[in-house]
Amino acid sequence: MIKVDKVYKVFNQGKINETIALKDISFRVKDEELALLKGPSGSGKSTLLSILAALLKPTSGDVEVEGKKVAKLPDNFASMYRRESIGFIFQKFNLIPTLSVYENVILPLIPSNLTKDEIDKKALLSMKKFSIEHKKDALAKSLSGGEQQRVAIARALVNDPKIILADEPTANLDTKLSRDFLVFLKELKDDKRTIVIATHDPIFFDLDIVDKEIEIVKGEMK
Amino acid sequence: MKLFNLLLFEYALSAIKRRGAKNIFILVIFFILIFLLSSIFFISNSIKKELSFTVDSLPDITIQKLQAGRQQDISLDVVDKLSQIEGVSEVAPRVWGYYYFKNAGANFAVVGVSRFDTNYKKSIQKVVDKFDKTLFDKNDTMIVGIGVDKILKNNYYDKYFNFIKPNGDFKRVYIAGTFKNGTLLESNDIILLSDDNAREIFGMAEDKATDITLRVPNPKEVNEIASKIRLMYPNFRVITKDDLRISYNNIFDYKSGIFLALFVVALFTFFIIIYDKTSGLSSDEKREIGVQKAVGWKIGDIILQKFYEAFILSFVAFFSAVTFAIFYVYFLNAPILRDIFTGYSVLKPPFELPFSFDFGTITLIFFTTVPLYIAATIIPSWFAATLEADEVIR
């Protein structure tokens, strides 16, 4: 369960360029639900997703994920929380271009206490699931957009997180690849994961796998 | 968090490879800096060691006569009085000086010894190569250093040399032998001959000597005896072995200073690297840290990876540079650099640097370079890692 209560986020507070990114945001996403955060560019969807992933701290309000208060988590606990509970798919994939596919996929597992064999097994499973294992030695920068996205998804899922957060996952994909992503999404939903997608791509609207749509405009819920 | 994580270590290695060109540049600068520093200290220590052997074999007290601030020949009348001082076991007048050989533009150190002194004969045989004993027993013979021998041969003096006396006459002296190659740093420019011949060449009277040396068996008495002589002969300069040791050290500390100037360039470049490192990371490096944090790396994990990266790089540079410096100094005999210490004359001494490994010096070099570089790598990474990941990767 994800609980968001009265979340505010103000950037550059008290300065001349102060910006209110989120204002009084409250919602719930139950376990195994797929929720869409809809809204135009710059509405605050990505900021909200970053707060859910504890990549960013809200100015005020509470965020609870699986019973854990994540809004004010100290840095190291936030990292642990992301490592154990969250799979994040970034808008621009955020792969490390000079690393191979395999190295990108295992990135979340490197600081863990797993053995090399265990890491190999997990990485292979994840790469197979998203049909990218044949490119395991290729550098991330040499991949096509669709392949990069599959690597990003494989990396997000390699530590088997319960919650998947995806920020504009189809923004850099063509129509065909976007449809392929919907297939992945269905698989993730079938895996009984809780998914939150921030998007303004109409391809997601009215999908039968979507359980909840939360619309945000200029930082406020509609 | 474990201090050693194999996967993190492998990641650090791959990070070094990924930024290959930049890291090779850093490695080369680091290598040059450590190599120069180590070589300087190795050469300096070796020469000091060699010189300390020399100083140990010097007389305990040397007495010279001064007039108008310059050294004058000393009268042998004082020898008896000096012998009577309690604690002095031996008093020996010496005849020596410098002979300028115009054709080669070189100064030879001419030292006179008594041909009839059996102790000298024995010790000379030990340090002399190519020695013609029968010739040496005759008058008008000499033993020369390797450098002198070379210069004489270049000027067609294969068997003898014609010294020009102060009155303009020639004095022919035959070469009876040469000092062993690499035995003594200071034997290179020496000409050893009988004191009679030395007197003749320098135009010195028979009741005079260049200086007088004293042996004092008890080292604790040396200063006391030196003070006594100063009181007896206020116009004499009394030099103890310790004075000479300080003087030698000063010369070589000064020459180390010239050496220091050599690696200032390397040091400067090193500090530019340090400045570059501490002034911030590239956008790619910042982004990578942001991604690492976003996928669950803690600040400690990032710092540990950066520590591995900096340690591998700096330690490889340090270890290879020190190893190469040992090889360069002790196996190759430090070509080029050695001349800064020893090349004060036309005669370049062909000595070998004795092995003198000072662990303290190496430790000092290690702690003034490696931790500095590691800190310069870790600090900006730590700054980037403490930022909110969202800020770095957007």
Image (cartoon, coloured by chain):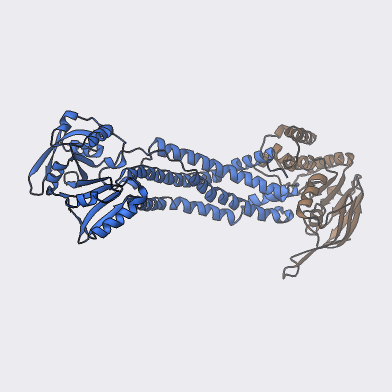
Chain colours: A brown, B blue
Q: Quadrant of residue B124?
A: top left
Q: Position of residue B232 (x, y in %)?
A: 24, 58
Residue nearest the viewer, comparing B174 with B148: B174
Q: Residue at x 75, y 45 (%)?
A: A173
Residue B385 left/right relative to B258: right
Residue B129 picture location, percent across and down: 25, 31
Q: Residue B185 location in percent, x, y?
A: 31, 41
Counting every numbered tag in the picture gives 0
Q: Would residue B325 appear left or right of A197 to someone viewing this image?
A: left
Quadrant in the picture for residue B390: bottom right
Residue A120, quarter of the rendered image? top right
Q: Residue at horizontal 29%, vertical 42%?
A: B186
Give the percent coordinates (x, y) of residue B15: 62, 42
Q: Quick check: B6 above or below B242? A: above
Is residue A68 visible to us here?
yes
**A36 to the left or right of A42:** right
